[in-house]
Amino acid sequence: MRCDNFRPMVNKLFASPEAALADIPDGSTIMIGGFGHAGMPAELIDALIAQGARELTIVNNNAGNADTGLAALLKAKRVRKILCSFPRQADSWHFDALYRAGEIELELVPQGTLAERIRAAGAGIGAFYTPTAYGTRLAEGKETRRIGDRDCVLEYPIHADYALIKAERADRWGNLVYRKSARNFGPIMASAARCAVVQVRETVELGALDPESIVTPGIFVKRVVRVAPSMRKAA
Amino acid sequence: MKKLDKKQIAARVARDIPDGAYVNLGIGLPTLVADHLPRGREIILHSENGILGVGPKPAPGEEDEDLINAGKEPVTLLPGGAYFHHADSFGMIRGRHLDFCILGAFQVSVAGDLANWHTGGADAIPAVGGAMDLAVGAKKVLVMMEHLTKSGESKIVERCTYPLTGARCVNRIYTDLAVIDVKPDGLQVVEMVEGLSFDELQRLSGVPLRRLATAA
């Protein structure tokens, strides 16, 4: 039996990107999904810039392209440190300028190690040994161990306060499906952040997503915002 | 001698990829291999950003910004293809599920050390991407590169002077001059381009080479 005023409604839908990001404090660690433009949550990043949080640590595969999205966040000088695998690109001029001026700290992480450190955080793993980067300068100063026939490097999880990701479709429980290779870091970043905020093209009724095909179950998602489809062209 | 151009190197690499192989093509030069895969073989291309069954590039106007390869160029998906997240993608790489990866290189050492991510210059912004994972993960690591630098120095070296991507990871080197296997006991020349003598290849390479008995 329910009382009339009892509303057991799980509703993670937020009215706007601004509302979904209003509480982000200075100094936060924020994962941002995407591989180049594919999967980059452009509207959430715009809202983060408008929100004004500073001294951020950002986790993304890249360090921004051209003048929008993550590049615009860098340009606005909101980022103290970035963890990524591939900062240097033909159009990464905002990162390049900050890096050369010594105004941003870079932690360069091999892409698979970046992904696994994020996954490990979401899965509650304390640390892991990986063969990647053994014997290279990216393993300098790290613990190593020979396991079987492979020399390995000890790597630690990357936890985040927030994850900003992009998916195709969500319901009010925060269940997600993605679109093509825009999935990339979304599922693992959602699990590694205390508060995962997702922008989606479409929201649907509970039960409308095929349970066999849900990629990120809603337990990993705190906030969902529907944004109009981006008109941005592929870079 | 008849040096191979980039497309010819790509075609030569492609010839060695067997039916049914799962293959990752590195960014840059190796992406050319996709255009030269022999007809009649079903070869499944992996892209580190979460795709198996990468198809050819789309027709003009058909590009989809959500469907790109590791080099962030628009691609298509073949029937039977699949999408997955980054940790699964690199699990495929690191977990030794890929039969081949094909990488470009600045240098390869006689021991099979690979340097392909950083010139080591003080002003250079380092970027590694998935290269270190591919170098340790694929069952066979194939390198394709020009044999000599623009100033004529061999890119096959006794010891890499550029920062390493992986140690003792390269299995075979394809250049515009030769195909060379990296064996535990040194480099073995498998093939040379027409008109190139073994002695000349040896002189240009500057590291000890061994001639496979059947090498032309």
Image (cartoon, coloured by chain):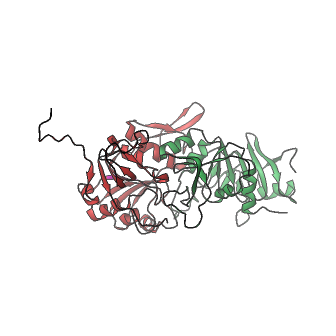
Chain colours: A red, B green
Horizontal placement of B175 versus B69: left or right? Answer: right
Is A135 covered by the magenta stretch?
no
Which residue is at the front of the view, A179 or B71? A179
How many numbered marks have been drawn onto this rendered protein structure? 0
As drawn, B51 above or below A126: below
Residue A16 in percent (x, y) is at 27, 59
Which residue is at the front of the view, A228 or A219? A228
Q: Is residue A110 visible?
A: no
Which residue is at the front of the view, A79 or B208? A79
Horizontal placement of B16 versus A38: left or right? Answer: right
Classify residue A132 by image quadrant: top right
Q: What's the residue at 28%, 65% (across, down)?
A: A50
Q: What's the residue at 42%, 43% (across, down)?
A: A215
Q: Which residues are magenta?
A: A29-33
Q: What's the residue at 15%, 32% (across, down)?
A: A1
Is A32 covered by the magenta stretch?
yes
Horizontal placement of B75 versus B205: left or right? Answer: left
Residue B209 in percent (x, y) is at 80, 49
Which residue is at the front of the view, A89 or B99? B99
Main SS, magenta residues: strand
Residue A166 in percent (x, y) is at 39, 54
Q: Is residue A178 visible?
A: yes
Residue B208 in percent (x, y) is at 79, 49
Classify residue B95 by image quadrant: top right
